[in-house]
């Protein structure tokens, strides 16, 4: 198995464990499901949490699944309180190397604060799913080169800039 | 990368982060740490898609966790043969902070191993037992060979069916009904459930010495869960499966070795364009194993 993965060009097969989570109380998860499916089709292992998870539940799922990436989808407007809380708890639980991205309805003016919390990309409505895959490839390359990209690493780089 | 045995030491002290990293390390390397205790209590749960396995497991997990057991759930999901990715199902809902400490849920993609029982499951179950998880539940995808093969890993098997009947009759043909220790007919809140249970009971009664229980439950309403848990607890571990278990283990290791053979892609292309035959392909593979070249 190892050997095969080395022979294949890296770009075609980089498999990561990704948790897609729905924090907050909104009940719409088509976006989260579309992204989950696209990531699976991109060759990743995707764990979708289902609706209405608390920050504590999400952090526990990321830990138990040993995920490398966490995608957070919110449409309710609670992103500015819930997402930073999740980021803090990840760091407190020795999960600072996890790459966090967000999607859903997130106003332009709130995005910078999310980057400050350690989020590395924010995707709005209408984003082609290939953008999310491109972001993950870029983030993985940065990680492999030892550049900060985890939620607990130095802020600075983000996909949107 | 931390050493597997170091991870096991801190996981045994109750560190969940280490346990989780240990399972990843086993999955990636295929190595297993040396374990002192014999693998403990493992329940397999299988059944057709949509029969409500996950919801029912959620209910049973709650019963066990609230009676002080530490429950680990391994959810097996198929890997896409096209992209190599997997979409792991909705997580079992576990509300209530008090129980969460005692519940560990991990999704396992089937990977490149056909039949969906990956050989890494054996060391993972061993590690969970070693770390003090007293109830291990393995949930399988509801179709195909995996239903049959899961019986080789677990020491008791629960078959879950819905009220629509037809499915389990198919399952009966495949032999799963023979292997199950307990059968639950879920969705007892819907019409048809009790007649489905009756149908299965009469099928079991064709053999005079078959006294296995068929339990009506509703995972949604929480009916019958206590009874089901008690029946599962009463099950004697199936030690008659010893030979079958070893056989399945050998097959799954063999399959894993075969699909990770460095020449497998070339051999398949040559088979496709007709330049070699199946028996020549087998000869190539076998001779490379003989030379220690896997």
Image (cartoon, helix red, strand yellow):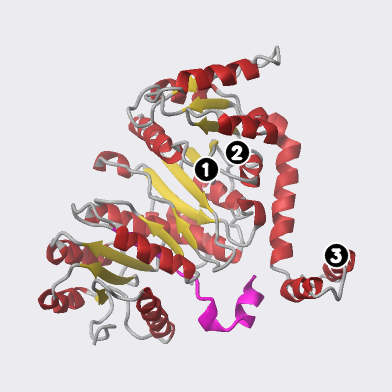
* Dot 3: chain letter: B
Q: Are marks 1 and 3 on the same chain?
A: yes
Is label 3 in a helix, a strand or a loop?
helix
Left or right of A45? Residue B79 is right
Does residue B234 lie above or below B104 as drawn? above
> Closer to the N terminus: mark 1 or mark 3?
1
Structural crowding at the residue carrying mark 2, measured as other residues with C-alpha within 10 Å and reported as few (<14), some (14–19) or many (≥20): many
Q: Are marks 2 and 1 on the same chain?
A: yes
Q: Which residues are magenta?
A: A1-21
Could you tell me which residue is drawn at 64 percent across and 82 percent down? Answer: A7
Residue located beneath label 2 in the image: B154
Is label 2 in a helix, a strand or a loop?
loop
Residue located beneath label 1 in the image: B138
Image depth: mark 3 or mark 2 in front: 3
How far across and how far down the image is residue A55, in percent?
A: 23, 56
Instruction: Give me the disc on residue B278.
Output: 3
| Mark pair 2, 1: CA separation | 8 Å
* Dot 2: chain letter: B
Left or right of B51? Residue A132 is left
Q: Is residue A8 magenta?
A: yes
Q: Check the picture and name the quadrant holding the C terminus of chain B.
A: bottom right
| Mark pair 1, 3: CA separation | 35 Å
How far across and how far down the image is residue B112, in percent?
A: 62, 62
> Closer to the N terminus: mark 3 or mark 2?
2
Could you tell me which residue is drawn at 72 percent across and 36 percent down? Answer: B242
Snapshot quadrant of residue A63: bottom left
């Amino acid at each position: 198995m190892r050997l095969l993965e080395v022979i294949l060009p890296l770009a075609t097969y980089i498999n990561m464990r990704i948790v897609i989570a729905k924090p907050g109380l909104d009940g719409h998860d088509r976006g989260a499901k579309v992204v989950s499916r696209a990531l699976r089709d991109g060759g990743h292992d995707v764990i979708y949490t289902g609706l209405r998870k608390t920050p504590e539940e999400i952090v526990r799922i990321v830990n138990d699944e040993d995920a490398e990436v966490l995608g957070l989808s919110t449409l309710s407007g609670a992103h500015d309180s819930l997402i930073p809380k999740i980021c803090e708890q990840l760091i407190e639980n020795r999960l600072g190397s996890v790459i966090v991205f967000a999607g859903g309805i997130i106003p332009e003016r709130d995005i910078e604060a999310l980057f400050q919390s350690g989020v590395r990309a924010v995707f709005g409505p209408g984003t082609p799913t290939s953008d999310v895959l491109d972001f993950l490839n870029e983030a993985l390359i940065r990680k492999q080169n030892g550049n900060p990209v985890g939620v607990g690493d130095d802020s600075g780089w983000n996909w949107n800039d | 990368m931390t050493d597997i045995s170091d991870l096991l030491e801190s996981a045994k002290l109750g560190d969940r982060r280490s346990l989780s990293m240990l399972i990843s390390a086993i999955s990636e390397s295929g190595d297993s740490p040396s374990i002192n205790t014999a693998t403990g209590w493992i329940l397999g749960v299988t059944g057709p898609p949509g029969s409500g396995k996950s919801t029912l497991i959620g209910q049973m997990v709650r019963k066990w966790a609230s009676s002080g057991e530490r429950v680990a759930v391994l959810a097996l999901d198929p890997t896409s043969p096209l992209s190599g990715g997997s979409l792991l199902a909705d997580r079992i809902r576990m509300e209530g902070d008090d129980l969460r400490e005692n519940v560990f849920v991990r999704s396992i993609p089937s990977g490149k191993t056909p039949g969906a029982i990956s050989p890494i499951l054996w060391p993972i179950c061993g590690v969970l037992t070693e770390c003090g998880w007293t109830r291990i539940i393995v949930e399988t995808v509801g179709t195909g060979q995996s239903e049959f093969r899961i019986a080789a890993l677990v020491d008791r098997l629960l078959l879950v069916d819905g009220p629509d009947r037809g499915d389990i009759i198919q399952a009966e043909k495949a032999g799963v009904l023979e292997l199950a220790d307990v059968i639950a007919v879920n969705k007892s809140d819907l019409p048809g459930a009790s007649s489905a249970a009756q149908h299965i009971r009469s099928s079991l009664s064709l053999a005079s010495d078959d006294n296995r229980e068929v339990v009506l439950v509703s995972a949604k309403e929480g009916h019958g869960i206590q009874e089901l848990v008690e029946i599962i607890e009463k099950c004697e571990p199936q030690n008659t499966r010893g030979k079958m278990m070893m056989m399945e283990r050998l097959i799954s290791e063999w399959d894993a070795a075969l699909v990770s053979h460095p020449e497998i892609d070339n051999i398949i292309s040559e088979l496709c364009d007709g330049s070699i035959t199946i028996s020549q392909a087998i000869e190539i593979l076998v001779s490379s194993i003989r030379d220690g070249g896997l």
